[in-house]
Amino acid sequence: MQILLDNADFASRMLQQVANGLTKGSVYALVAVGYTMVYGVLALINFAHSDVYMLGAYFAYYPARWLGYMPDTAEKPKAPFWLMGMAFLGAMAACAFIGALIERLAYRPLRNASRLAALITAIGVSIFLQNVGQMAFGADPKSFPRYVDQSSVNLGVISVGNTSILIIVVAFLMMAALHLFVQKTRTGAAMRACAHDMKTARLMGINVDATISITFALGSAMAAVGGILVAMDQPRLTPTMGLLMGLKAFVAAVLGGIGSIPGAALGGILLGVAESLVGGLWDTTYAEAVSFVVLIVVLLVKPSGLLGRAGREKV
Amino acid sequence: MSKPILELADVNVYYGAIHALKGVSLSVRQGEVVTLIGANGAGKTTTLATVCGLMRPRSGTVRYGGEDIGKVPTHQLVARGLVMAPEGRGIFPALTVEENLRLGAYARRDKPGIEKDLQHGFEIFPRLAERRRQRGGTLSGGEQQMLAIARALMSQPKLLLLDEPSLGLAPLIVQTIFETIDQVNKQGVTILLVEQNARIALKHSHRAYVIESGEISIEGESAALLDDPRVKAAYLGES
Ligand SMILES: Nc1ncnc2c1ncn2[C@@H]1O[C@H](COP(=O)(O)OP(=O)(O)O)[C@@H](O)[C@H]1O
Ligand SMILES: [Mg+2]
């Protein structure tokens, strides 16, 4: 009887961790698509991507703050729903613009330069954005406004935060929309053609520069959504909040197969669940090491990742 | 005599310090098949790349339909009917035959016209119709060349640039490809054809230029070049 109880308890703890992992993993997936799409087209690891994620969260912070909706002040009301919608759309648009601008100013002039030059530039842009963030927003953490009141939802043996459900649902919808866009639209076809062979894409009449701009813009808008969702769940913003997220999302992209959008989704979910299981059933300090272990194992065993195309060495 | 659709005047092109085209001048008139023959490394591919805007001349002019296109990006030239089937064919190996063909029509918006041309392409190349859902990378060399030409036709070219369509193909397939080139030309497409296989290129063209180390050395009617002793010695393996 005791063993049965223990087993039931263990199973519910497992389930709880899987739910937590799905939440984390959904955000990894949202950020990972930006890495994977840019890498797919330019063979460039866009280190600045994680900082665009950070900017997304801040862009959703300021409108609510300016209008006086702040947390920890019980007398102030919760930000209205329309403001949340505006925050999402505004941050996505602003990050899309910034992502495309980064490509235009920093990466395009180096399109024909060595890969190392582009990589170092990407690191430089990332450091630059973090410093701009510190100057513009301050290095001290900011509390994210109350766009939603956190509560927990009871699902039988486990309970899940309402923000977790929001994250999973929004991330799933965004990923599905992106996938459809890339597979079904004319612009999506251009993106895929550029990822396969940029010179031939040009000969098909595709405006390669415009397509690359769109690729950066789309990835950046997805990262902005990720930043806002995380801030709703853990309402603490810092200019360096992108660092760890960027690392994990990159590992998720590699795990899924860099260049593949469904791969980024799968890699993100798997990494999130793996981290949560290790953290919840073993030790939270080990959870942070999971992504490093995964990265090393993937690079050793299957560098093309789970859903990636083999034999397309771009680095 | 019909007016030139393409004119290169004293074009110089460099790869860094390498002077690849040294004052190349040539013209292609509406309705013609013109061939540019030359040995490996002579500058044939560079000439085509310069025409379609993948390379830019350091000096000299490239005119298409009378207009200087020295600064027009490649994708806009495609929309204006200047289309290239590149050396090595440039098939997207992971995409199906049909997806490859549809990408050829990327610059077009006329859905019914695209469907009609797709069917037309399958009529010209029944082999491609059979392999419609097969990935481009699984095709044989000859089939890939057919796909490259069919895909270029999907862009509705006025001037079609072909870079060594015979490369690496068995003689029988080469024959088929060149018959198709004749057929495409008869349907009104002007063609600039680059070849190392001088004999077949001269047989299937109206006029020809010979390029040597980045310079045009001989030009004339293709039939005349077939009898030219210099061409015979250097390019037709006769003495
Ligand atoms: N990407 C390149 N970088 C440097 N040199 C090149 C490049 N492409 C071609 N060349 C040089 O330019 C010359 C002409 O090459 P190309 O036009 O490819 O000749 P062809 O097509 O007639 O074989 C050759 O000497 C070749 O070595
Ligand atoms: Mg060549």
Image (cartoon, coloured by chain):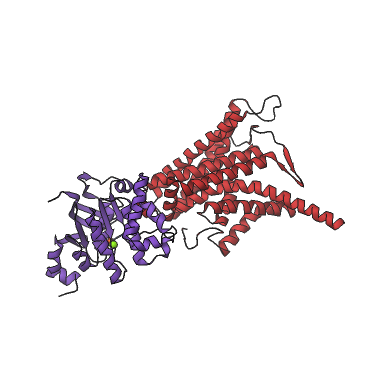
Chain colours: A red, B purple
Quadrant location, the N terminus of chain A: bottom right
For ligand 1, the image quadrant comes to: bottom left
Q: Which quadrant would residue B100 be assigned to in this image?
A: bottom left
Q: How many labels does the image show?
A: 0
Q: In this view, does B45 lie above or below A211?
A: below
Q: In this view, does B227 lie above or below B66?
A: below
Q: Which residue is drawn at 80% across and 53% down?
A: A8
Q: Where is residue A273 in the image (x, y as percent from the top left)?
A: 66, 52
Q: Residue at x 47, y 47 (%)?
A: A184
The foreground one among A75 and A284 is A75
Q: Residue furthest right?
A: A1
Q: Position of residue B39 (x, y in %)?
A: 23, 66
Q: Which quadrant would residue B20 be assigned to in this image?
A: bottom left
Q: Where is residue A102 in the image (x, y as percent from the top left)?
A: 46, 42
Q: Is residue A123 above or below residue A72?
A: below
Query: Is residue A19 in sight in this rendering?
Result: yes
Query: Is residue B58 shown left or right of residue A87?
Result: left
The foreground one among A204 and A289 is A204
Q: Which residue is drawn at 57% across and 32% down?
A: A85
Query: Is residue A224 shown left or right of residue B194?
Result: right
Query: Is residue A285 shown left or right of residue A298?
Result: right
Query: Is residue B41 in sight in this rendering?
Result: no
Query: Is residue B152 shown left or right of residue A33?
Result: left
Q: Position of residue A202 (x, y in %)?
A: 36, 51
